[in-house]
Image (cartoon, grey):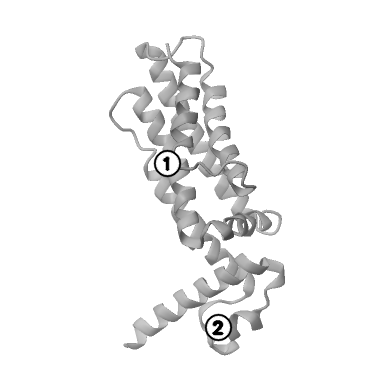
Amino acid sequence: MLQGEYLVETRKKILFEAFKLFLSRGYRNVSLNDVVHTVGVTKGGFYHYFKSKDELYIEVINTYFFSLFDRYMEMLQPSRGSVKERLWSVFSEIYAVYDEMIALVGEENFRGMTAILFSGLKRFDFILRRLKELYTEIMDALERIIEEGKKRGELRREVDAHASAFGAIALGEGTMILWIINLDGGRKDLPKRLFENYWRGIAA
């Protein structure tokens, strides 16, 4: 393996092994010694890639969370189709992101994955900032679609676009929380059923 390739692969390995350690133990309970021992590098080797455990954590969050969210944001670009089709596209992609997370770590570790993200909210301002940006963009996209639907006569005129957009996001995120505590395991068909119920509440 060439030197450049080795450096890239070693960095990826450190990130992935640290991610798994944070997943199983939580950020506070993982030491730098745990990381270097698991990866098989020296502390000096570790510092070649990351300045600190905090910097490592930030890169883990960016790699395994915000990269997924960024791909989701691309789905919010203007698209064709009926208002119902476009709302379903936004709605269903929320679930697709969580399905990707579950596929990455397994259902048994999904709780730990969300804990990694939210445990850093107080310590790292950028997490809250990025989450605010994410949900603001989703809200704006949903409101635009809903307002267009009202103008086109696909949605009732009295529908509150902001409240309906907020409700759509809350429905998706609330379902994720219930999955985490395992109140409903029907992930395959539940999103569509929830959306159809939501749609009946706003359709003309």
Alpha-carbon span between mark 1 and mark 2: 36 Å
In this view, the residue in front, 31 or 3, is 31
Q: Residue at x 53, y 23 (%)?
A: 164
Q: Which element carries disc 1, helix, strand or loop?
A: helix
Q: Is residue 35 left or right of residue 2?
A: right
N-terminal-most mark, 1 or 2 = 2
- The quarter of the image holding the C terminus is top left
Residue 46: which numbered mark, if any? 2
The amino acid on which the numbered mark 1 sits, given as a three-letter code, is Glu
Query: Cβ–Cβ below 8 Å for labels 1 and 2?
Result: no
Q: Residue at x 51, y 79 (%)?
A: 49
In this view, the residue in front, 81 or 171, is 171
In this view, the residue in front, 129 or 187, is 187
Residue lying farthest left? Answer: 80
Q: Residue at x 51, y 20 (%)?
A: 161
Residue holding disc 1? 93
Q: Residue at x 61, y 56 (%)?
A: 117
* 110 is higher (above) or lower (below) than 55: above
- The quarter of the image holding the N terminus is bottom left
Residue 62 is situated, as x and y percent measured from the top left of the image, at: 51, 60
Q: Which element carries disc 2, helix, strand or loop?
A: helix
Q: Is residue 103 left or right of residue 77?
A: right
Residue 72 is situated, as x and y percent measured from the top left of the image, at: 42, 46
Residue 118 is situated, as x and y percent measured from the top left of the image, at: 65, 53
Q: Is residue 101 left or right of residue 121?
A: left
Residue 83 is situated, as x and y percent measured from the top left of the image, at: 36, 23
Residue 191: which numbered mark, if any? none
Mark 1 or mark 2, which is nearer to you? 1
* 48 is higher (above) or lower (below) than 189: below
Label 2 packing within 10 angstroms: few (<14), some (14-19), many (20+): many
